Image (tube, coloured by chain):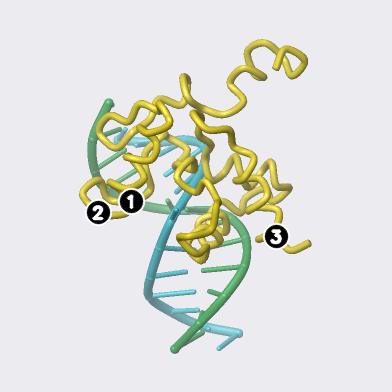
Chain colours: A yellow, B cyan, C green
Amino acid sequence: VTPADRIANLVARIPAGSVASYGQVADLAGLPGRARLVGKVLRETPPDRPLPWHRVLRADGRIAFPPNSESGRRQADRLAEEGVEVRGGRVDLARFGWNLDAVLWGPGAV
DNA sequence: ACCGTGACGGTAT
DNA sequence: TATACCGCCACGG
């Protein structure tokens, strides 16, 4: 199992309607400190592949692309499509961040 | 081996 | 809250 596989596997697990950061994905994939690797894997992932790459944001909730870029707008649209509120190219991780429930209520309540 | 690059992160201002 | 910097890691030239 290559690092890229574990990363893709994890991204695929992010539920619709919530988001995760590159670093979070790296950590959960057992690759601490490889946030940039996550970006690379997603970058090299074909657009047609059924991977929810749009649910991955920076640690501060900002979309990794320039707000006016084509990719940036596309990502924002797809997120909005799932009910994720995007304002100023940014998402409130406190509300849409993955695992928030687990953090607040404990893994057993999820 | 050296250096620059990047879908990143954390801290200091 | 928004920038500016600097650290990190994997790659490629």
Please tell me whether residue B2 is drawn above or below residue A2 in the rendered image: below
Residue drawn 40% across the image and 28% down it = A84
**Front-lying residue, A78 or C13:** A78
**Front-lying residue, A2 or A82:** A82
**Front-lying residue, A59 or A52:** A52
Please give the residue where the numbered disc 1 appears in the rendered image: A65
Type of amino acid at the residue the image marks with label 2: Ser
- Assign the N terminus of chain A to one quadrant of the image: bottom right
Please tell me whether residue C3 is drawn above or below residue A82 in the rendered image: below
Instruction: For mark 2, name the chain.
Output: A
**Front-lying residue, A11 or A40:** A11
**Label 2 in the same subunit as label 1:** yes
Looking at the image, do the residues carrying marks 3 and 2 touch, with CB atoms under 8 Å apart? no
Please give the residue where the numbered disc 2 appears in the rendered image: A69
Type of amino acid at the residue the image marks with label 3: Pro
> Which SS class for mark 2?
loop
- Assign the C terminus of chain A to one quadrant of the image: top right
**Any mark on residue A3, and which?**
3
Type of amino acid at the residue the image marks with label 1: Phe
Residue drawn 49% across the image and 29% down it = A17
A98 sits to left or right of A75: right
Q: Position of residue A102 (x, y in %)?
A: 67, 19
Looking at the image, do the residues carrying marks 2 and 1 touch, with CB atoms under 8 Å apart? yes
Label 3 crowd (10 A; few <14 / some 14-19 / many >=20): some
Residue drawn 49% across the image and 49% down it = A53
Label 1 crowd (10 A; few <14 / some 14-19 / many >=20): some
Q: Tell me the distance, in whole angstroms, between the alpha carbons under discs 3 and 2.
A: 29 Å
Q: Tell me the distance, in whole angstroms, between the alpha carbons under discs 1 and 3.
A: 23 Å
Q: Earlier in the sequence, mark 1 or mark 3?
A: 3
Q: Earlier in the sequence, mark 3 or mark 2?
A: 3
Residue drawn 70% across the image and 47% down it = A29
